[in-house]
Amino acid sequence: MTPALPPSSQPDHASRGPALARRALPPLLFCLARIVVCGTLIGWLAPELLGPFRHDTPELTTPARLSKTLATATRTLDQELFSTLKKVAPGLRPFNPQERLETFQGVQWRSTRLELQLPASVSPEKVVGALQALSFDADWQVRLKPLWLEPLSPSIHITVRGYPTHLLTLHPALQPAEVPAASPRPRIAILIDDLGVDRSALEALWPLETPFSVAILPFTPYALELAERAYQRQKEILVHLPMEPLPRPDGERLEPPLGQLTLQMSLEEVKQKTRRAVLAVPYARGVNNHQGSAFTRDRTRMSAMLEVLLPEQLFFVDSRTIGDSIGLELARELGIPATGRQLFLDNDPEPDRIRQALERLKAVALKKGSALGIGHPYPTTLEVLRTWLPEAQQAGFDLVPVSSVTE
Ligand SMILES: [Zn+2]
């Protein structure tokens, strides 16, 4: 290999060294020393020749080293991302920050979720473009991927060496929408889920004439009473069917809700439990999943659950607690009316945020003809909806039950 090295870079010990060493060291030791010297030199001068044996690789793959790399990379990403955001979208307001310490096979890293309210002059596409133009240390293998988890609001999903570190959702600024006089009235369905635990949850909304729908958790203390009340007020009722979520990253196991469908159940058990849940919520016209990030990816068990809905003429709303849920696709295959297109109203239960989410819902309805918004029985959500529902109707939107936006 000596001829391959440029003369100027030939170190002294590569020419004179061997003669000295040959006298001083036994032959075996000399060979070893030579391998080490050559290996180190190639490592310095032409690292690609050593391929997977490059000296830093084994250390990088240990969980401790990888965790350290991820920590450095996420810190740098934080700085770069936010200075770019400040530059392209001055006046942008971040909200709903969530930071988590994640662990996987001994590797630890921090993941950040953040929503960003953009100023009126800046489009989400412009921000996505600016973030995608950033470049980082090649060794970190940073990938930025735009996702559309919500219509109109793209998210940027960022991974470092395959580990998800950031999820940034960009919300455009919207003016209160009015429906043009000549166009047909766009339809909006509002669904409040997670009901059944608190008796007085919907007190603020019951007096409203405007249609909204309720999803009730089966076997909860007030499931029957709330279903009865909703039926009397002519509100559409759904079974909020609990399904197994993925394990929590911190390893903590929470008490599963009653009637939860799990991956351990046989297909017959899944069907039986689904039938019982449907019977536990009287007057139900449809079903949507509570949690289910693990269960909704299981094709055979999801099919078994959906087969129960078909003869009962129940529709299905895929709550999409995970990106690759197959609930909607399967329901369509079986001919069950369904929807998966929706927007969460209160990821951040701050009243201003809820109003912004409702404006986005109107914009989606204007664009697509209909939209479904899902909220929770938080006092702020109910208070905002109490005034928003009649106002939206006044502004030209048709407030409809969830079944009207299924296909
Ligand atoms: Zn739920």
Image: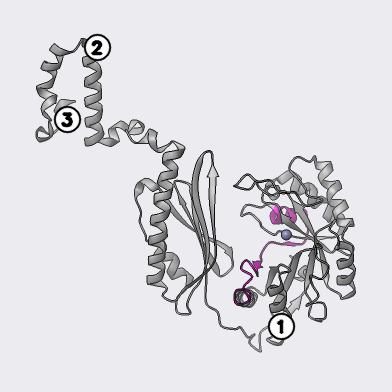
Depth check: 233 or 67 in front?
Answer: 67
Disc 2 crowd rating (10 Å Cα; few below 14, some 14-19, many 20+) is few
Q: Earlier in the sequence, mark 1 or mark 2?
A: 2
**Badge 1 element:** helix
Q: Which mark is residue 387?
A: 1
- Tell me which amino acid carries mark 2: Leu
Residue sitting at 61 percent across and 83 percent down?
177
- Asked if residue 346 is among those painted magenta in the image, a careful observer would answer yes
Instruction: Report the residue marked by disc 2.
Output: 28
The residue mark sitting in front, 3 or 1, is 1
Disc 3 crowd rating (10 Å Cα; few below 14, some 14-19, many 20+) is few
Part of the protein shown in magenta: 327-354
x, y (%) of residue 366? Answer: 63, 78
- Tell me which amino acid carries mark 1: Thr
Side of 155 relative to 6 (left or right): right
Disc 1 crowd rating (10 Å Cα; few below 14, some 14-19, many 20+) is few
Q: Is residue 181 above or below residue 197?
A: below
Do the numbered discs 3 and 1 sit on residues whose CB atoms are within 8 Å? no
Instruction: Report the residue marked by disc 3.
Output: 4
Depth check: 57 or 257 in front?
Answer: 257
x, y (%) of residue 237? Answer: 83, 66
